[in-house]
Image: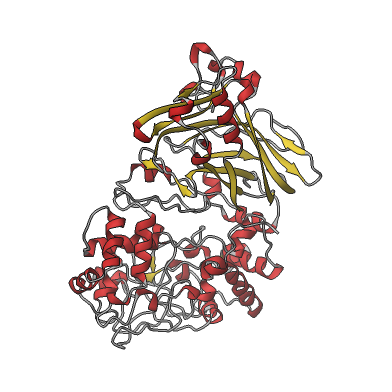
């Protein structure tokens, strides 16, 4: 369906993932950043995310059956159509056959449109309801996944004909049930919202729908407990007026995000806890969050407080944050961290971000899960050197802390397991995904020519026989996470007391192998390597240029090169360092400076 300016809007009926949006092949990655053509490039896409709220508080699907300001909602379903965007000249870019179905109970909170042109827009417009021709059409014509298929939306009135545009059902104070159905052609509600953004790349418009506003001025006792929008129905007119003022744009993000509602809906959430909204780009692999420890606002808040609590150390002088500082992407600027009693650590503190995808923790992978990992530094004699029993006792002396544990877990009690779960929740929210490189991929920033040359080196093999003279970095640091999460020997001289992964497995084949760190934020996480031996990125690149220590366990992707190494030129090394610096996520490193509303320049 082409409407104007080659813009096509397509209906979005169910949550789908396209691998091309999450994992870019090397040629496609270069094409997206450099602006060259590539057949696999994704069509620019706009997504609407509409979060139901009560006032300013999110209403999750899991909580829709609980009381909100003395109102208990059981259903909030609605249909949208006629999506349009206001152009700079005041005209509207309109769609004639775009439809979307949203449902609180079913967790359907998104709709999409493809083909967003690279120009500025100042407003968005859509209607709650469907056009008369669609309202009167045979519902059997719609495909099995179409928004207007009665099996999908459940909003068709069957033999009576026509659709319910919005169904708002629940219980008023005193358990008085209400069932408000907005329907019939005169009750279509047109919504127009000002919002400035520019198309041409992936985009998410974050909206809210205020359920409190929908019910404003409506009293089930006085006005009636139901409306089916018949002619002359004053209650339907009031509901329609409320609908027109209930939507609001809260943020613009130049990216697309993975849905987490299905996992959250099935999670065993503590009584009284609230969902913690987490935004994870679709460019990242699909994430699997722990079903037995769902992210909640209360749990994440508690975890963050514990992360900064010095009572987790033996003498109450050191917290997790002491060695994981935000401006260093939650790593340590020192080569070795100092313990609570001044003892020198044995390895460089790893940065903490994108941990939901990690397959092992610490440089040697001795912790299999994040929940296991968070308790180890507390007990390690080189670090906080405290027992879990003493930590629990100290926290139990704090009435405020006891309340926070109660709120986070739905019942009284502080335990080591709950400490681990709270810290796990907080750490899982530390997502770094918006570096200048990411912005270049999304067409909201541009790399310099030097940075593009560095990227080309990064993704190119070093194979002189075939005319390839790259830096060969992508084998270990490829993909959107910039790590393969494996353990590799990268040709460093080894200290006899630290043999890497071998200390965990006991196998000689693991001698000298350490976890591949992510290169995201690499420019701010110096010093480098497991022992912090390199102070600068230039030293790191020079090491990989060669020569390096050769032994039986040296990773094949390094051992395949001549003993002298790949011998990058001085200019190539500078180009590579320039590209690596584009991987810094300034909003993650300096969150206090991050804008609340992201606008494309």
Q: Where is residue 361 shown, x and y percent of the image?
A: 34, 66
Q: Where is residue 554 shown, x and y percent of the image?
A: 40, 72
Q: Where is residue 409 shown, x and y percent of the image?
A: 28, 55
Q: Residue furthest right?
A: 89
Q: Is residue 181 left or right of residue 116?
A: left
Quadrant containing the C terminus in the rendered view: bottom right
Question: Does 234 appear above or below 529?
Answer: above
Residue at the (29%, 74%) spot, across then down: 377
Question: For residue 169, which quarter of the picture?
Answer: top left
Which is nearer the eye, 550 or 244? 244
From where the camera sits, is residue 358 visible? Answer: no
Question: For residue 344, which quarter of the picture?
Answer: bottom left
Residue at the (57%, 30%) spot, across then down: 238
Residue at the (49%, 53%) spot, across then down: 279
Which is nearer the eye, 41 or 43? 43
Question: Does 398 appear above or below 290?
Answer: below
């Amino acid at each position: 369906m082409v409407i104007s300016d080659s813009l096509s809007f397509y209906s979005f009926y169910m949550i789908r993932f396209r691998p091309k949006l999450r994992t870019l092949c090397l040629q496609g990655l270069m094409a997206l950043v450099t602006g060259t053509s590539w057949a696999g490039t994704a069509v620019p896409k706009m997504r609407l995310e509409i979060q139901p709220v009560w006032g300013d508080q999110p209403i999750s699907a899991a909580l829709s059956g609980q009381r909100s300001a003395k109102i208990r909602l059981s259903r909030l379903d609605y249909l949208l159509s006629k999506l349009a965007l206001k152009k700079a000249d005041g005209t509207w870019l309109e769609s004639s056959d775009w439809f979307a179905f949203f449902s609180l109970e079913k967790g359907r909170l998104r709709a999409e449109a493809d083909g967003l042109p690279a120009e500025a827009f100042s407003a968005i417009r859509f209607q709650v309801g469907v056009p008369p021709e669609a309202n009167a059409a045979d519902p059997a014509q719609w495909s099995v996944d179409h928004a207007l298929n009665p099996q999908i939306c459940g909003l068709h009135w069957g033999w009576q004909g026509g659709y319910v545009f919005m169904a708002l059902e629940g219980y008023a104070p005193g358990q008085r049930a209400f069932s408000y159905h907005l329907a019939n052609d005169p009750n279509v509600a047109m919504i127009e919202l000002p919002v400035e953004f520019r198309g041409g790349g992936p985009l998410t418009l974050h909206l809210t729908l205020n359920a409190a506003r929908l019910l404003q001025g409506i009293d089930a006792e006085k006005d009636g407990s139901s409306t089916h929008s018949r002619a002359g129905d004053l209650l339907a007119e009031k509901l329609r007026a409320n609908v027109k003022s209930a939507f609001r744009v809260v943020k613009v993000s130049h990216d697309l995000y993975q849905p987490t509602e299905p996992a959250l809906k099935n999670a065993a959430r503590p009584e009284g806890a609230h969902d913690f909204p987490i935004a994870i780009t679709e460019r990242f692999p699909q994430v699997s969050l722990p079903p037995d420890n769902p992210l909640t606002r209360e749990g994440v808040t508690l975890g963050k407080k514990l992360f900064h609590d010095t009572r987790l150390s033996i003498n109450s002088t050191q917290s997790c944050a002491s060695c994981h500082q935000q401006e260093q992407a939650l790593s340590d600027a020192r080569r070795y961290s100092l313990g609570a009693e001044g003892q020198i650590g044995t390895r460089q503190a790893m940065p903490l971000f994108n941990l939901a995808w990690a397959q092992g923790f610490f440089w040697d992978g001795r912790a299999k899960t994040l929940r296991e990992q968070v308790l180890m530094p507390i007990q390690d004699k080189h670090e906080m050197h405290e027992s879990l029993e003493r930590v629990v006792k100290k926290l139990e002396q704090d009435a405020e802390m006891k309340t926070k544990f109660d709120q986070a877990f739905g019942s009284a009690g502080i335990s080591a397991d709950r400490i681990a779960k709270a810290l796990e929740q907080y750490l899982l929210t530390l997502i770094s995904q918006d570096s200048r490189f990411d912005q270049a991929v999304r067409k909201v920033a541009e790399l310099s020519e030097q940075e593009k040359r560095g990227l080309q080196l990064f993704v190119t093999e070093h194979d002189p026989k075939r005319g390839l003279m790259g830096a060969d970095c992508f084998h270990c640091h490829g993909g959107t996470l910039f790590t393969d999460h494996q353990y590799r020997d990268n040709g460093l001289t080894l200290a006899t007391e630290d043999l890497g992964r071998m200390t965990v497995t006991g196998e000689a084949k693991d001698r000298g192998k350490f976890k591949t760190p992510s290169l995201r934020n690499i420019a701010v996480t110096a010093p480098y390597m497991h022992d912090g031996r390199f102070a600068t990125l230039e030293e790191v690149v020079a090491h990989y240029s060669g020569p390096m220590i050769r032994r039986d366990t040296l990773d094949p992707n390094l051992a395949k090169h001549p003993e002298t190494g790949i011998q990058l030129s001085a200019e190539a090394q500078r180009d590579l360092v320039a590209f690596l610096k584009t991987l810094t996520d300034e909003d993650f490193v300096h969150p206090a400076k991050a804008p609340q509303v992201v606008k494309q320049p």
